[in-house]
Image (cartoon, rainbow, N blue to C red):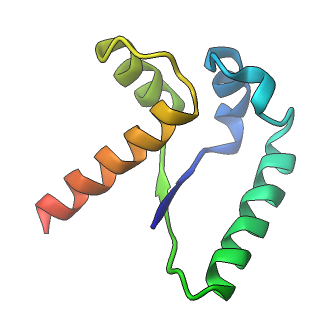
Amino acid sequence: MDVASYPRQEWPRLLASASDRADLVDTYDEWLQSAQRTLLKLGAQGITVEKTDVGVDELVSWCQQEHRALDGTARASYVSLKVQRRLEKM
C-alpha cells in the first residue's frame, strides 16, 4: 500500500487548492502526526506501507488535465498512478 507524502513547504498550497479543504487538518504537523499514527496502525496489522512523494504543483496540474476536483479521491488516484508508473519502470 502506498500513501502520499507532501513537502512541508507545499502544505499551504495543498490546502488552498483542495476542494475538500474542510476535511483536511490546518497544519502540516497535524497531518504528519495523523499520517504517522495511520502508518503505525497499518504496520501493526502487517500491512506494508510505502510513502510516495507528491509535489502539490504536479498534483494540481494533473487534476486540471483530468478535469477533476482536487479531493481525497483524486489524491489517492494520483498516488496510484505514480506507483503504477514507478513499477512500469522496473
The image shows a total of numbered marks equal to 0
Relative depth, front residue between 7 and 44: 44
Asked whether the viewer can see residue 55, the reply is no
Give how far across and how far down residue 38 sits, in percent.
Answer: 72, 66
Relative to residue 30, is residue 72 drawn left or right?
left
Please give the name of the residue rendered at 62% of the width and 44% of the height, measured from the top-left corner: 7
Relative to residue 22, is residue 68 drawn left or right?
left
Relative depth, front residue between 12 and 84: 84
Please give the name of the residue rendered at 86% of the width and 48% of the height, measured from the top-left corner: 30
Q: Quadrant of residue 86?
A: bottom left
Please give the name of the residue rendered at 40% of the width and 20% of the height, measured from the top-left corner: 63
Give how far across and how far down residue 50 sits, in percent.
Answer: 48, 69
Residue furthest to the front in view is 45
Q: Quadrant of residue 81?
A: top left
Give how far across and how far down residue 87 sits, in percent.
Answer: 20, 63
**83 is higher (above) or lower (below) than 46:** above
Please give the name of the residue rendered at 69% of the width and 16% of the height, measured from the top-left corner: 16
**82 is higher (above) or lower (below) than 62:** below
- Quick one: quadrant of the N terminus? bottom left
**84 is higher (above) or lower (below) than 28:** below
